[in-house]
Image (cartoon, grey):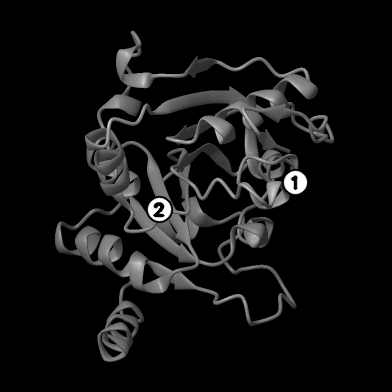
Amino acid sequence: MAKNKLQKFDEMAQFPNVFQHSGKESFEEDFHLKGKWNEKFFNNTNPIILELGCGKGEYTIDLAKKYFNKNFIGIDIKGARIWRGAKTSNEINLRNVAFLRTKIENISNFFQNQEVSEIWIPFPDPQPKKPKKRLSSFIFLNLYQKILTQNGIIHLKTDSFELYQYTLDTLKSNQIEPLEAYLDLYSSGCKSVVKQTQTFYEKMFLEQGKKITYLSFRLNINKNLIQPEKIEIDGYKY
């Protein structure tokens, strides 16, 4: 297994659309493509879409194939996972795809203010005991709003009702109305692309009979977001 991982890392180091920062290096200066992804890498002015905790990049790849007029960047700290998406994108010659290996808390070192148009967060770890580590916590939302455009959209898709409700309460605490909110996406009237793309885990959850929730919303740029008051839902505290 270790040998297989090393082979993947060696191969990934040769991919032209993969950029790696393991998290051990210090940020003495910002990433060289910060503010220049369109100009220096994609060579166009199309909107940039991020997939956070992208794993194998299933959303990144599928959306990139559907929307050639947009640029997609999958972000994850797990290099062995990114390898699959990066390899696939190179094999099918997707020019509107890149992958970034780094911790999501470092995201502001890689993207300029208002450089990103959308953020997808499909099936993140709900972090039941560590609310501040949830990718939809007020801490991360404050990071996202710095790099999102004025009308930038965040999409959260999860099988965790607790994470869904926590995110709703975070939005409510900050006077943000969701654009869409579905407790059971596949029983809803939603007809957007959010139903058309499914990750490996989403398919597994659906086979187990779990409901999939979905939220989309915009953030108020330059507003310092706060955490919701501590509450309890069905024995779940935050």
Circle on res. 43: 2
Circle on res. 139: 1
**Quarter of the figure with the N terminus:** bottom left
Q: Quadrant of residue 42?
A: bottom left
Q: Is residue 2 above or below residue 142?
A: below
For the point 31% across and 39% down, which residue is it?
A: 205
Secondary structure state at the residue bearing disc 2: loop
Q: In this view, does 1 lie above or below 229?
A: below
Q: Give amino acid for label 1.
A: Ile
Say left or right for 129 vs 231.
left
Secondary structure state at the residue bearing disc 1: helix
Asked if residue 150 shows in the view, the reply is no
How many numbered discs, if any? 2
Name the residue nearer the viewer: 80 or 153.
Answer: 80
Name the residue nearer the viewer: 209 or 170.
Answer: 209
Residue 52: percent from left, percent from top: 49, 50
- Crowding at dot 2, Cα within 10 Å, few <14 / some 14-19 / many 20+, comes out as few
Q: In which quarter of the image is residue 103?
A: bottom right
Mark earlier in primary sequence (2, 1):
2
Can you tell which of label 2 and label 1 is closer to the viewer?
Answer: 1
Q: Give amino acid for label 2.
A: Asn
**Quarter of the figure with the C terminus:** top right
